[in-house]
Amino acid sequence: MHSGKRFLAFVPTAIFIAISAVFAQGQQAASSGPDLNFPTVLYGAAYYNEYMPGDDSDHVARLAKDVALMKAAGLNVVRMGESTWSLWEPEDGRFEYAWMDRVVDAMGNAGIKVIMGTPTYALPAWMAHQHPEILADRIPGGMFGGQPIKSAYGIRQNMDTDSPAYRFYAERLIRHIVAHYKDNPNVIGWQLDNETGSYDAANPDVFVGFQHYLEKKFVTPEALSKAWFLNYWGENLHTWEDLPKRDGTISTGYKLEWTRWSQMRVTDFLHWQASLVRECAGPRQFITTDYGGMMKRDVNEEAVSDSLDIVADNIYHGTQDHYDGSFQALQSDFSRSLKHSNFLVTETNGQTIGWTSGGQYPPYDGQMREDVYTYLANGANMVEYWHWASIHGNQETYWKGVLSHDLEPNREYAEVSRTAHELEKIGPQLVGLKVHNEVAILWSRDSANAISFMPYGGGVPARSWTGEPDGYASLVQQMHKALYDLNVGADFVFPEAKDFSQYKLLIVPALYISDDALLQRISDYVKNGGHVVMTFKSGFANENSAVRWVRAPGPLREAAGISYQEFSSLEHPLALKDDPFHAGADNKVSFWSEFLMPEHAKPVAYYDHPFFGKWPAITENTFGTGTLLYEGTYLSDKLQTAVLKSALDKAGLTNSDQQLPAAVHVQHGTNRLGKRLHYYFNYSGAEVKLTYAYTSGTNLLDGKPAAKSSELTLAPWDLAIIEEP
């Protein structure tokens, strides 16, 4: 039945089932809501029986083999269903469940639980044919944008999620699937969509929504014109109908507000889905969504998390000699900070990753096992691989799973099996780890976006796995990596936070966009005894991306004890005079320099240069009972680590952890039994020895005692988990 016109009736809806078998002991939660007190670690993979070669009978035979292999390995969870709308609904209004029912039943019979995804991120061909307006009109990249380009069918995630037609079909699909599995004891939770973003959509309905949003926020076009300084080039607005489209705008205020609108669209879409799923799901089934890597510029992860029972993230990272746990820790810290709670890893490296065969680096022996414990040490309650079996065709042929294309047990399968059997024994002592940190990093998505409009250095290092040298993400990652290398844990806090007092040290990277109230809260935090390390570009522009018309750094001037009127790009790296932080060959700064004029602050370091040497590169100010250290330039990695080590020392946040061998990372937490856990990781291919500095305990991995001040030996790519009594 053709239903192409029925979407007009669409009206957006307002915004764990009991675990059996190996999870039977966890059935103590009230039936009024999802049970997130998993009695052991969830460990498994995404599974796509529908991707297997052959016909239906081959799929049935392969399913039996896969389930037997999973059960033998000790896996206890799979994630399914999010990628194949066209199988759930092969034609408009006809729904099919048998192909998935047999998989869910087979998993249940083996004691393997299921997280089901709403398959809304990959449009079926029939829908694109009937409603081409659903496809996203994307703004071209670059400084000046351009007329939106119509997306072609075949690319995944290429839709306007605000489209009434899309919402109609998505709601119908969600209601059918969720209702079908609401009482199924094998389905413990629901994943909303998949790696959701704005997809850069600028369709007519998106623009109309943006205009209405601006009308509510600014009330009059004159107020908007004033906030955005539209006198520039005579672009003032006097009627909302004259609002230009996003296509080629040069207004930094417009661009920043558009990014906020894009984020709001993602938030609304996922809140809408969460509301639908809650209406239709079983009361014990939890709701999550798999963020496709944290710190995206078009997704407000904090706002999205409000609609979730538990946060989940897809975390991909370097392997072989590029494997050190740092990126996993960065993503995990951010995930944990969203709800100040444990989280799920819905995807991570199975073998090799990549949309081509050009970067195939399978993990060394031990790295897959160590990876699982890396996530658990940072507060994860689940680790799943993407995916179980490597796909035999199409774009992700070389984004391999646990099994290779031959679908037989292999080296990776053996390591997964070893890990799973360990978790069968000690998982209840590891799940639900609580991590307490006294350092926080302030993450500003507005600053990330605004700096991308006005970058300060084309050669800024590309640190994230995306390879994007945007100057903000690289700085945040540098500072987090420095803390990581110093064995100091960190949370993330957000501009909306009203109070930072639970932390002894607050790291503030390039807070380019901020209202006065946030800057005042930071100043008050320092005045009341907090310690801040802040970098260049902070306090420079207001919430509308307009440079403040007072001397920089604006409202931070008193707390920072400095001001400046000039700044310069640095054509070449400069050294700091007399190498004050003993960085040796890495005693270098780059990209940007603010000509800091101390008013109350103490100069900490000067440039070793006949011109730039007139101004300090780093200052420190005592304000009230706290301190604010200000970096007026981009420090080298080693220099940044040394500066943060000094700040940690002054805040009383260093101990024996900073004396560990360079390859060793330690993570601390408290398990559900109230016992302190200490994870020691050897992220290297050589054996290392270290001194265990905490209360005597037991290594959960081998059952051997670990006395205080005794020597621990870690094999290559191995770890120890010491539990105190």
Image: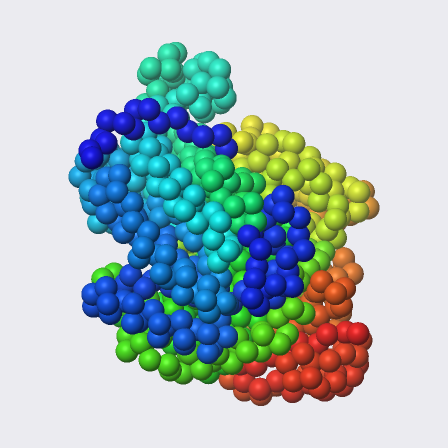
As drawn, which residue projects farthest toward the top? 238
| 625 to the left or right of 141 | right
Task: Please state which of residues 207 and 161 is positioned toward the viewer in this rendering.
Answer: 161
Q: Is residue 33 positioned above or below 520 on the image?
A: below
Q: Is residue 73 visible?
A: yes
| 370 to the left or right of 654 | left
Question: How far from the left and from the top, in percent, is residue 268?
Answer: 46, 34
Question: How far from the left and from the top, in percent, is residue 339?
Answer: 61, 48
Question: How far from the left and from the top, in percent, is residue 531?
Answer: 73, 50
Q: Residue at x 63, y 43 (%)?
A: 32
Q: Residue at x 60, y 40 (%)?
A: 495
Task: Please state which of residues 441 and 635 is positioned toward the viewer in this rendering.
Answer: 441
- Could you tell me which quadrant the N terminus lies in? top left
| 193 to the left or right of 667 | left
| 480 to the left or right of 438 | left
Task: Please state which of residues 93 and 430 is positioned toward the viewer in this rendering.
Answer: 93
Question: How far from the left and from the top, in percent, is residue 423?
Answer: 58, 74
- Could you tell me which quadrant the C terminus lies in? bottom right
Q: Residue at x 51, y 81 (%)?
A: 418
Q: Is residue 83 positioned above or below 364 on the image?
A: above
